[in-house]
């Protein structure tokens, strides 16, 4: 869950050019680069990372979320949100808390078609159709999960300013926000237990990512697909990309087109607009599923379209930990202070917190441990000069688990993200849910206390390394009423109408069905989340 960039270095004509499926019309830089999800902060969380990445990789992504449900046609593939970007406290004091410390990103999500992605059973996927709902655990049933179309997950991610620059950091600018369209796919066949060949995995990863910043003209700066992506793909450019200010009021629009999903952000405060279409013309593509012993690594140009027509508990990405389709999520559980960073490579982001260093906030210091990865020294920050790590905070004691979330103290803490429930074709989503994947990241098979088969030892909030409950866990609240009703995340802050029981809002343990890897279509059930489905949408 760290944020590693893997690079294949070489002159033009080597890896970056010799790979098949070259996109025309986009000039590729000589250095190939891709996002490696085995330790990246912002990838879609898989249901069982040891199965995908091996036992020595990330523990998981902590993603408190709101999910939105509607049976109206189109609610699974076109929607509009209102969004106010949060602000940081004034000044640059390292004793304050800033947005990059609470969340390296937050995002709006949607399930997508990708016929080269898990479970690798069909060469077609009917876009925006509920015929794709196949969750039956019986492998012989017509709607068996084993007969599900290939699935990916889209995240329109927003990145806070002020720390280490892309790449390999998460800030586009010292003071401005930016956004990118991410589509995560999983190159794995769970029916017969095969995965993408190791040669291609080294070039694109097994959970591969299409990535493009939202630009002012809607054209990608460089290929978005992982086979052909270059350093230019992940390097923001304020003259071309949409940069936004803290506090700006935005309209976020997601809708399908003939050429793929169009994501558009209109900044009502500045009048600027940015967009990106998940099209082959913008360099988006699938990675051809070529299991071992084949060494092929081919981009298949592809227009990514939404998978489902509606949004419900049944419209999910079957390889993901969450029960997501239409959702908003915050990416938390990463940043922790580090008193001394060692072994840092600014290109690859491989810094560690030194063995002799301390992690944690003032008054809660302890020796650095194994979860202090993807670390950067304060000198590498664009604005706020603090040293820290953004890998998995498996001990649940980093900054996001402290009472430093929005609470009305704008001198020392950020303001809240504020966003509306989505509208689809002008209609509201009549139900919603709160969901958090604490069981997935507190799993006993990763050294935690939670047995995901029985639910024993799973706690909300999660437990720290010393067996105590985390100091704090952020929660959603309503702000305002009626047409002015917005969702906020953090602590109680001025304007809150209802907090739904604070962290208890995430509800009881949720058991989801998954395919057994190599099981010929057999399924198992795991507790990966807490979920609380409300009978109506209060906002």
Image: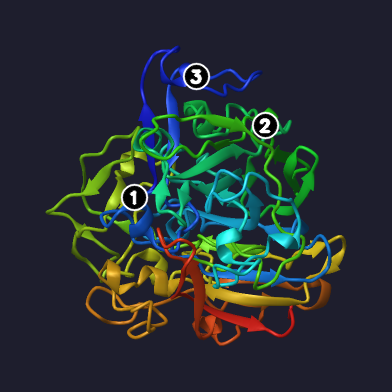
Foreground mark, 1 or 3?
Answer: 3
Query: Where in the figure is residue 20, as x and y percent of width and height?
Result: 52, 22
Q: Is residue 29 left or right of residue 284?
A: left
On screen, 503 above or below 297? below
Any part of residue 26 in sight: yes
Circle 3 sits on which residue? 29
What is the CA distance from the residue labelled 2 to the residue labelled 1? 40 Å
Query: Where in the figure is residue 376, as x and y percent of width and height?
Result: 31, 44
For marks 1 and 3 on the same chain, the one whose residue lies earlier in the sequence: 3
What is the CA distance from the residue labelled 2 to the residue labelled 3? 18 Å
Callout 1 environment at 10 Å: few (<14), some (14 to 19), or many (20+)?
A: some
Query: Where in the figure is residue 434, as x and y percent of width and height?
Result: 59, 76
Foreground mark, 2 or 3?
Answer: 2
What is the CA distance from the residue labelled 1 to the residue labelled 3? 32 Å
Circle 2 sits on which residue? 280
Question: Residue at horizontal 34%, vertical 52%?
Answer: 53
Foreground mark, 2 or 1?
Answer: 2
Question: Residue at horizontal 69%, vertical 38%?
Answer: 303
Question: Residue at horizontal 36%, vertical 60%?
Answer: 95
Circle 1 sits on which residue? 386
Q: Are marks 1 and 3 in contact (CB under 8 Å)?
A: no
On screen, 189 above or below 214? below
Q: Quadrant of residue 443?
A: bottom left
Q: Residue 180 or 495: which is nearer the viewer?
A: 180
Any part of residue 335 in sight: no
Q: Residue 245 or 456: which is nearer the viewer?
A: 456
Query: Where in the figure is residue 395, as x and y percent of width and height?
Result: 29, 68
């Amino acid at each position: 869950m760290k944020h590693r960039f893997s690079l294949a270095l070489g002159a033009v004509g080597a890896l970056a050019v010799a790979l098949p499926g070259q996109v025309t019309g986009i000039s590729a830089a000589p250095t190939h680069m891709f996002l490696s999800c085995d330790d990246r902060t912002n990838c879609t969380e898989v249901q069982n990372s040891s199965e995908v990445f091996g036992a020595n990789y990330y523990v998981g992504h902590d993603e408190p979320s709101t999910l939105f449900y509607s049976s109206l046609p189109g609610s699974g593939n076109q929607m509009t949100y209102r969004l106010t970007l949060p602000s940081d406290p004034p000044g640059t004091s390292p004793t304050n808390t800033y947005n990059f410390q609470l969340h390296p990103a937050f995002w709006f999500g949607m399930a997508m078609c990708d016929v080269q992605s898990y479970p690798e059973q069909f060469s077609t996927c009917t876009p925006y159709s509920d015929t794709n709902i196949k969750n039956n655990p019986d492998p012989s049933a017509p709607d068996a999960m084993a007969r599900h179309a290939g699935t990916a997950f889209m995240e329109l991610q927003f990145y806070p300013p002020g720390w280490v620059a892309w790449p390999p950091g998460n800030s586009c600018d010292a003071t401005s926000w930016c956004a990118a369209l991410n589509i995560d796919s999983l190159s794995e066949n769970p029916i017969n237990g095969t995965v993408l060949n190791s040669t291609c995995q080294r070039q694109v990863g097994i959970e591969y990512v299409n990535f493009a910043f939202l630009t002012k003209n809607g054209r990608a700066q460089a290929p978005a697909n992982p086979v052909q992506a270059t350093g230019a793909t992940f390097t923001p450019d304020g003259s071309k990309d949409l940069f936004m200010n803290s506090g700006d009021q935005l309209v976020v629009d997601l809708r399908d087109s003939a050429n793929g999903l169009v994501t558009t952000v209109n900044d009502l405060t500045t009048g600027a607009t940015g967009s990106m279409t998940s099209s082959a013309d913008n360099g988006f593509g699938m990675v051809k599923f070529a299991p071992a012993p084949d060494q092929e690594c081919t981009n298949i140009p592809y227009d990514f379209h939404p998978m489902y027509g509606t949004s419900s508990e049944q419209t999910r990405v079957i390889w993901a930990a969450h029960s997501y389709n239409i959702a908003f999520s915050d990416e938390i559980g990463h940043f922790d202070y580090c008193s001394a960073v060692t072994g840092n490579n600014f290109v690859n982001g491989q810094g560690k917190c030194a063995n002799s260093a301390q992690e944690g906030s003032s008054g809660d210091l302890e020796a650095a441990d194994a979860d202090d990865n993807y670390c950067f020294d304060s000198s590498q920050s664009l604005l706020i000069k603090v040293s820290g790590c953004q890998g998995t905070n498996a001990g649940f004691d980093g900054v996001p688990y402290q009472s430093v979330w929005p609470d009305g103290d704008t001198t020392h803490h950020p303001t809240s993200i504020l966003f509306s429930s989505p509208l689809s074709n002008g209609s509201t989503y009549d139900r919603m849910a709160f969901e958090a994947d604490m069981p997935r990241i507190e799993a006993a098979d990763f050294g935690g206390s939670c047995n995901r088969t029985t639910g024993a030892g799973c706690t909300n909030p999660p437990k720290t390394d010393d067996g105590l409950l985390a100091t704090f866990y952020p929660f959603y609240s309503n702000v305002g009423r009626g047409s002015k009703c917005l969702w906020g995340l953090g602590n109680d802050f001025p304007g809150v109408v209802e907090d739904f029981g604070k962290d208890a809002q995430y509800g009881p343990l949720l058991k989801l069905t998954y395919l057994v890897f190599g099981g010929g279509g057999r399924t198992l059930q795991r507790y990966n989340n807490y979920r609380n489905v409300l009978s109506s949408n209060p906002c």
